[in-house]
Amino acid sequence: GENVEQHPSTLSVQEGDSAVIKCTYSDSASNYFPWYKQELGKRPQLIIDIRSNVGEKKDQRIAVTLNKTAKHFSLHITETQPEDSAVYFCAADTGGFKTIFGAGTRLFVKA
Amino acid sequence: DTAVSQTPKYLVTQMGNDKSIKCEQNLGHDTMYWYKQDSKKFLKIMFSYNNKELIINETVPNRFSPKSPDKAHLNLHINSLELGDSAVYFCASSFKSVNEQFFGPGTRLTVL
């Protein structure tokens, strides 16, 4: 079955720096790759997603890239702010009503 | 106006008891899910339903029984609770598959 690996598990950056989180997936049939942000004690919320027919997508300070050949996708956050501190999850979905999440990355942004 | 709601928010119970968690969405979605998030924050799918039909049952013990009375509701009943069931349970909904999922606030279950 599908497996999603996410790295790093913890990431600490200085405010204003960039943060990059990387994921790999195993099932080549995966065609939808969402990223969720979960603040402490809150529910996960979608921040950006990408579909397999697109290589890159950007929304203000957040961008996601997808390399289907290598089965890699990455989240890039530029000009990080303290409110970006949270746990970030990547996920992969083949369209079979089963979303597989990565193990999460705890991002700390130091002011 | 809450999109996806769950009750209760907290559940503290003894081993061996039976408990239920309710979930409702008012987004008009046709797909609903249950996830378990353990103490290490790992988010694992348990069940998914599409148009009230069970689609995914992800090797969950049969002590867990989901029920979808209609497309807007997906409840989770747990029999004979065990210590290892302690976790946060999230309900979510989406329009079909491969689309954004909207999560409920979570139910923190503690089994003593």
Image: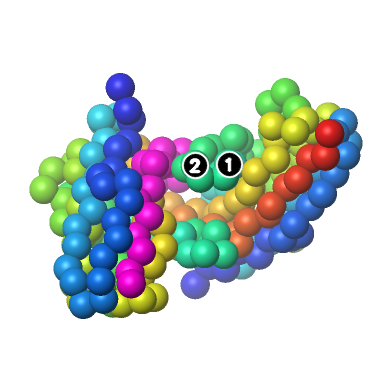
Is residue B100 magenta-colored? yes
- Give the residue number, with chain letter if any, for mark 1: A39
Residue positioned 51% across, 38% down in the render: A45
Residue B16 inside the magenta-drawn segment: no
Chain designation of label 1: A
At x 65% / y 43%, what residue is drawn?
A86
Find residue B103 and report its image quarter. Answer: top left
In the visual, does A39 lie left or right of A60?
left
- Exactly how many numbered labels are in the figure? 2
Find out whether the residues at labels 2 and 1 contact each other: C-beta distance under 8 Å: yes
Give me the chain letter of mark 2: A
How is this picture coloured?
Answer: rainbow
Which residue is at a point 51% across and 45% down the rendered structure image? A41
Q: Secondary structure at mark 1?
A: loop
Mark 2 surroundings within 10 Å by alpha-carbon count, few (fewer than 14), some (14 through 19), many (20 or more): few
Percent across and percent down for residue B20 are 19, 58
Residue B39 percent coordinates (x, y): 52, 64
Residue B99 visible in this rendered orientation of the protein? no
For the residue carrying disc 1, how many other residues have a C-alpha within 10 Å: few (<14), some (14-19), or many (20+)? some
Q: Which stretch did the figure color magenta?
A: B97-112
The answer to whether residue B40 is seen in the rendering is yes
Above or below, B34 relative to B15? above
Quadrant in which residue B17 is drawn = bottom left
Residue A4 versus residue A75 in the image, above or below: below
In the rendering, at what x and y percent does residue B12 appear? 30, 60
- Amino acid found under the numbered disc labelled 1: Glu
Q: Nearer the viewer, residue B79 or A18?
A: B79
Q: Which residue is mark 2?
A: A42
Label 2 is placed on what type of residue? Lys
* Residue B56 horizontal/vertical position (percent): 31, 63
Q: Residue at x 16, y 56 (%)?
A: B67
Q: Which corner quadrant holds the C terminus of chain A?
A: top right
